[in-house]
Amino acid sequence: MAKYDDASWHTGGDYPEDLHEENAATHIGMYLMWCIENKLISEELIEHAPEQIQKVKNREITGAEFLIEYCDGQLDDDDLSDLGNLFSNDYYDEESLYAEKNNTYVDDYTQTFEKKAEEQDFAYETVYHIEDDFENYDLVQPIISQRFEGWKASKDL
């Protein structure tokens, strides 16, 4: 089993003491929400949590809330479809050829919110201070979609 990201990886070391550990799942949850919306999740996950997946689609819960409750705070290859895994292998891995030529998801995520903060004349204390809300998801969603379309074109899919 390959693991793309895990909230627990982010909570050690210099993780801000003033934040709940759930904040470490925000960026992962936004990516998972995009995968849910784009039908790139596994049949196993769909069978495991159909009502909760619908709640994500209806924006009743965030992707991070789903990730924490139903995926133990981690995103791995069991959660994604074959196409979702192919894309995630390239987009999430900083050593992939695709990411080297374009960007990784985490880089796109960070740059999106750095730009937001700059435009609104403030700065996030850390990347973990980005709010887990649908307004922020709506900022990063089109960038992931653009990367996905570019990735598919590069693979002739």
Image: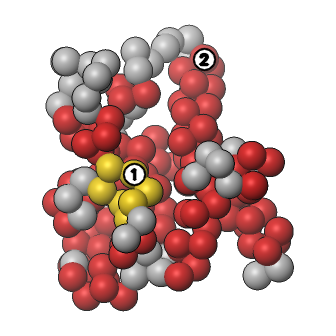
Where does the N terminus fall, quadrant-wise?
bottom left
Q: Identify which residue is drawn at 78% across, 63% down.
A: 150
Q: Residue at x 51, y 49 (%)?
A: 138
* Residue linked to disc 2: 118
Up the image or down, 76 lies above or below 131; here it is below
Few, some or many residues within 10 Å of mark 2 (<14, 14–19, 20+): few
Can residue 60 be seen here? The reply is no
Quarter of the image holding residue 3?
bottom left
Q: Residue at x 32, y 50 (%)?
A: 6
Q: Is residue 138 above or below residue 54?
A: above
Query: Is residue 80 found left or right of 106 in the rendered image?
Result: left
Report whether 45 appears left or right of 97: left
Q: Residue at x 76, y 81 (%)?
A: 157
Give the labeled residue for mark 1.
5
Residue 8: tell me if it is visible.
Answer: yes
Image quadrant in which you'd find residue 119 = top right
Rendering coords of residue 109 (x, y %): 55, 40
Residue 54's label in the rendered image is none
Amino acid type assigned to the residue bearing label 2 in the image: Glu
Contact, mark 1 vs mark 2 (Cβ under 8 Å): no
